[in-house]
Image (cartoon, grey):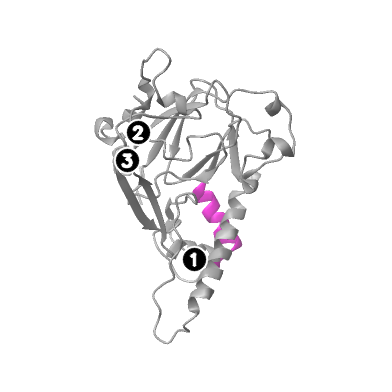
């Protein structure tokens, strides 16, 4: 029903076989003790970092497809169980998280984290125009290989996609964000330009690393983030080509953290926008 609200035809726009689910317990995807299968695994693949209890850095989904989904729907089925060790804050409770993504004032218990990528891009342009230029003009490569399901997906695109430069440090509006360091392949240097030094690739990698560090610095700021402890039944709709999502670490337990959801394609979302009179870039 939610998909029908944001997409043109939900029967055609639900990705990956329809509704998916993730669980921090592998037993959730196997038959239970009575031999009954779990019906919450439609379209699920466990070859993904979301199927675990470690923290997930901020990212957009499916950077490895040419046109990533426009909307991702999250439904919290069962939050992570609060354990005795997670009830106290401190360095030890953060050992399973990515250091750059840690907020030391938050005890990690699987909280969901969101960030507006368009806002982050604007902030980068204000602080470091050269870093913005590099991330808006350098195509990065992403892939996903799943031998069990039988696919090898790969796509390229800049982290920040705009409508193009407009002279100087001025750029057109940001159209989309494509960012997932967990799926990103090593960067390839540009083709050599006639007359350029042979080792010009060293300069390329150095400047790109500096630009990416500047981007990561903005994504790591608490002031840019929204942290929510989703409760059973809570539902979140994320504009996947604009908003980042991530997750704090949590301790695996007898009762796994379970999230269900689905995707709606960007073309269908854009169609809905046009039908209600919104401008699509």
For residue 269, which quarter of the picture? Answer: top left
Q: Which residue is mark 3?
A: 265
Q: Which residue is mark 1?
A: 133
- Choose the circle earlier in sequence order: 1 or 2: 2
SS state under label 3: loop
Q: Position of residue 129 (x, y in %)?
A: 55, 65
Residue at screen point 37% across, 50% down: 64
Q: CA distance from mark 3 to mark 2?
A: 10 Å
Q: Position of residue 277 (x, y in %)?
A: 33, 40
Dominant secondary structure of the residues highlighted in magenta in the image: helix
**Foreground residue among 24 and 200:** 24
SS state under label 1: helix
Residue at screen point 36% across, 47% down: 145
Using the rendered image of the protein, determine whether residue 105 is visible from the camera's viewpoint.
no
| 249 lies above or below 136 | above
Whether residue 85 sits left or right of residue 149 in the image: it is: right
Q: Position of residue 50 (x, y in %)?
A: 48, 37
Q: Which residues are magenta?
A: 116-130
Q: Position of residue 232 (x, y in %)?
A: 51, 20
Label drawn at residue 6: 2
For the residues carrying marks 3 and 2, which lies nearer the camera in this image?
Answer: 3
- Is label 1 in contact with label 2 (beta carbons under 8 Å)? no
**Foreground residue among 278 and 203:** 203
| 254 lies above or below 13 | above
* Label 1 Cα crowd, 10 Å radius (few <14 / some 14-19 / many 20+): some
Using the rendered image of the protein, determine whether residue 5 is visible from the camera's viewpoint.
yes
SS state under label 2: helix
Across the whole image, how many numbered discs are drawn on residues?
3
The quadrant in which the N terminus is found is top left
| 95 lies above or below 254 | below
Residue 122 part of the magenta-drawn span: yes
């Amino acid at each position: 029903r939610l998909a029908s609200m944001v997409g043109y035809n939900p029967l055609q726009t639900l990705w990956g076989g329809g509704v998916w689910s993730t669980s921090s317990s592998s037993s959730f995807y196997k038959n239970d003790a009575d031999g009954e299968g779990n019906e919450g695994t439609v379209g699920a693949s466990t070859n993904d970092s979301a199927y675990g209890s470690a923290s997930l850095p901020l990212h957009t989904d499916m950077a490895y497809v040419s046109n990533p989904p426009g909307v991702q729907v999250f439904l919290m089925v069962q939050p992570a169980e609060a354990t005795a060790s997670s009830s106290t804050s401190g360095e030890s409770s953060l050992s399973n998280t990515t250091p750059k993504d840690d907020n030391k004032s938050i005890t990690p218990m699987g909280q969901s984290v969101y960030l507006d990528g368009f806002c982050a891009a604007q902030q980068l342009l204000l602080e470091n125009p050269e870093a913005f230029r590099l991330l808006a003009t350098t195509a990065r490569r992403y892939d996903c290989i799943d031998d069990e399901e039988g696919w090898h997906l790969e796509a390229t695109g800049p982290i920040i996609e705009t409508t193009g430069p407009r002279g100087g440090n001025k750029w057109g509006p940001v159209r989309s964000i494509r960012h997932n360091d967990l799926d990103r392949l090593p960067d390839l240097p540009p083709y050599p330009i006639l007359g350029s030094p042979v080792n010009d690739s060293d300069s390329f990698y150095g400047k790109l690393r500096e630009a990416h560090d500047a981007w990561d610095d903005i994504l790591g700021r608490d002031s840019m983030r929204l942290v929510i402890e989703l409760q059973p039944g809570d539902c979140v709709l994320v504009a996947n080509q604009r908003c980042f999502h991530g997750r704090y670490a949590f301790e695996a337990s007898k009762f796994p953290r379970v999230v269900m959801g689905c995707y709606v394609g960007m073309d269908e979302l854009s169609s809905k926008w046009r039908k209600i009179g919104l401008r699509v870039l």
